Amino acid sequence: MKVLIVGGGGREHALAWKVASSAHVDRVYVAPGNAGTVREPKVENVAIPAGEITALLAFARSARIDLTLVGSEVPLVAGIVDRFDEAGLRCFGPSGSAAALEGSKVYAKSFMDRHGIATAPYASFSDLHAASAYIRAQALPLVIKANGLAAGKGVVIARSAEEGVRAASDMLAGHAFGSAGQEIVVEGFLEGEEASFIVVSDGIDVLPLASSQDHKARDAGDRGPNTGGMGAYSPAPVVTRAVSDRVMSEIVLPTIRGMAREGRPYRGFLYVGVMVAPDGTPRVLEYNCRLGDPEAEVILFRLRSDLVEIIEAGLTGRLKKIQPLWDQRAALGVVLAAAGYPGLPRMGDVIAGLDGEHPADTAVFHSGTAIKEGRIVTAGGRVVCVCARGATVSEAQSLAYARVKKIQWQGMYYRPDIGYRAVARETKEADP
Ligand code: AMP
Ligand code: GLY
């Protein structure tokens, strides 16, 4: 079969790599892809941006694509799945109305209220005066969020009322995120440890994927501005069996049932960002209507089963029959970013060290890369994600950073401490 993957980041490179390894698949097209996808066996890039649904549909028809997977949230929220469905083409992901769980934080918060799903207390505003008065009356810290899509950057954690009012004002005035910020959510700060809990749903049944943990802050020790994610690892030790059971019964299943009841049945990948409180109570930080990036890279690097078979089961309501096999080892991924990220990144620098002999159990998934005059150059904020598998997170971490050391370009930046929480746990267990 022929598969089309929509997007051009590290998540889509990992998807293309994994899908191409399926015995069912002859050819994989990635729109638009990057310099990494184009180098994978069986894979080719198609020069159509992920947001151009009409062009993607025309391509899928003319190339006789059997299955389309959508990596990024922008086309999902814009209704790509509805358009493909209408045309009789198979496209795995939520409809535009179901993708509102990510596309509108105001919808997501009110949905959780209606269905008794635990999350931080909140209020929503489109008026700055009302928002400021509310912010000044709340305990600190407070979290200010743009309602719409902001590439993982529309969240400000305010430690003072002034900071909160400034963030609200930036968003509501349209300076920071355009129309995505015309409405905001102000919510209470949740204490605990974060985890990414990603599942596949066919609208009724749910298959949980391996747990993972992302590092959203730019700098070591979780400092600096929020980014799309600077690294991840899987599994996340904070998601114990008991926590996983609670996330499923208190969050994921009520979400899938609630969406069906609201006439927006949810099919596709569902990503729940959870904060696990010290007593083990999980609460929702955010929903995403797709796989995470860089979570997808480490999760897919551990998946031993055929992803296409899982997705086929999701499309035909047979998820209950699927039991995926996971590599029991841990996987860890370090994002190498361009100078300036998460602001406007420096681009066009030649990347050295991608080729040559590399240790087994490592992989480099490309995000913002392009080919210019036959050389691979930086073309985005997050440039590559360097992944490794190891018996422990500590082992995966050493192997990943050893490979990171071989890669270089002008202004390359990365966090030196991806996986630090899990490594600290492992060290404590080994030497109590
Ligand atoms: P979001 O895009 O909503 O997940 O927010 C981005 C990041 O901000 C999250 O991954 C958390 O690290 C942090 N965050 C968001 N909401 C809260 C909250 N209510 N309490 C504490 N941290 C939060
Ligand atoms: N890594 C966080 C996200 O994909 O939203």
Image (cartoon, rainbow, N blue to C red):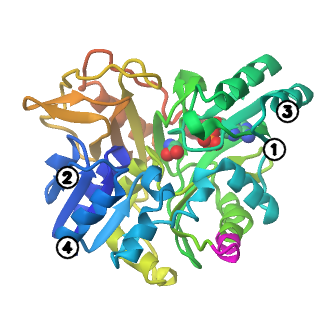
Residue visible at 48% across and 49% down in the picture? 292
Residue type marked 1: Tyr
Residue visible at 35% across and 35% down in the picture? 400
User: Which mark is on residue 180?
Assistant: none
Q: In the visual, does 86 lie left or right of 374?
A: right
Q: Residue furthest left?
A: 374
Instruction: Kindly state the secondary structure of the residue where label 3 is placed.
Output: helix
Instruction: Kindly state the secondary structure of the residue where label 2 is placed.
Output: loop
| Mark 3 or 4, nearer chain start | 4
Residue type marked 4: Arg
Badge 2 vs badge 3, beta-carbon distance below 8 Å: no
Identify the magenta region: 256-263
Q: Is residue 261 magenta?
A: yes
Q: Badge 4 is on which residue?
A: 64
Q: Badge 1 is on which residue?
A: 122
Tell me where residue 197 appears, x and y as whole percent: 58, 56
Q: In the visual, does 353 lie left or right of 208?
A: left
**Disc 2 versus disc 1: distance between alpha carbons?**
42 Å
**Disc 2 versus disc 3: distance between alpha carbons?**
47 Å
Tell me where residue 282 appears, x and y as whole percent: 73, 53
Q: Residue furthest right?
A: 137
**In the figure, 54 relative to 387: above or below?**
below
**Disc 4 versus disc 2: distance between alpha carbons?**
14 Å
| Mark 4 or 2, nearer chain start | 2
Label 4 CB-ligand 2 distance < 8 A? no
Instruction: Kindly state the secondary structure of the residue where label 4 is placed.
Output: loop
Tell me where residue 363 appears, x and y as whole percent: 27, 44
